[in-house]
Image (spheres, grey):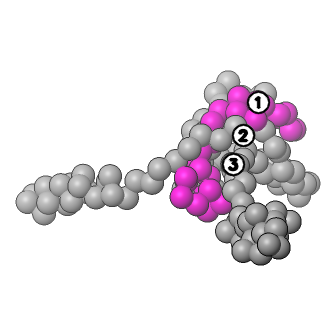
Amino acid sequence: MRCLAVLVAGLALAGPALAEAVEQAPGGVVRFLDKATGRTEDLDLSRGQSAQRGWLTIQLDDCRYPVADPASNAYAHLTVIDSRWTEPAFAGWMIASSPALSAMDHPRYDVWVLRCDYPVRPAASEAGSESDPEATSEGTGE
């Protein structure tokens, strides 16, 4: 019992250290697969927008990405409704880097998040552009 208490205390202390800062994105990209036909399609959705494919209505409720490295991962809250069912086929968070962690269980279709939309930051090499004379040491040639 003491081991369990130590484990819980350790996880409680490690939690904030393991958490990464995330930012809300204006939208994201979700991949749709029809298992019967093999057809795939990437859906670019804004936050709150939905798209209908086959029997499914796929809605992107929220999309978040790590501030330190936006391209590394995406966390999206999706609501997927099958028009033939009374309950949603899926409602919850999906993680792009671990799609099986919280996967939609549907006999015909598969849906998973690929990425969030995020602002593109200029690369360090592009910061001092050669087309800007004041950005170089040569400047005006004086």
The answer to whether residue 110 is left or right of residue 7 is right
The image shows residue 1 at horizontal and vertical percentages of 10, 58
Who comes first in sequence, dot 3 or dot 2? 2
At label 3, the amino acid type is Tyr
Query: Which SS class for mark 1?
Result: loop
The image shows residue 17 at horizontal and vertical percentages of 33, 58
**Front position among marks 1 and 2:** 2
The answer to whether 29 is drawn above or below residue 69 in the figure is above
Q: Which residues are magenta?
A: 46-75
Question: Are the residues at dot 1 and dot 2 in contact (C-beta closer than 8 Å)?
Answer: yes
Name the residue carrying label 2: 27
Question: Are the residues at dot 3 and dot 1 in contact (C-beta closer than 8 Å)?
Answer: no
At label 1, the amino acid type is Gln
Instruction: Locate residue 100: give its quadrant.
Output: bottom right
Q: Is residue 90 among the parts visible in the rendering?
A: no
The image shows residue 119 at horizontal and vertical percentages of 70, 49
Who comes first in sequence, dot 3 or dot 1? 1
- Identify the residue at image location x=80%, y=49%: 32
Q: Residues within 10 Å of mark 2 (few under 14, many from 20)?
A: many
Instruction: Locate residue 43: give its quadrant.
Output: top right
Q: Nearer the viewer, residue 31 or 89?
A: 31
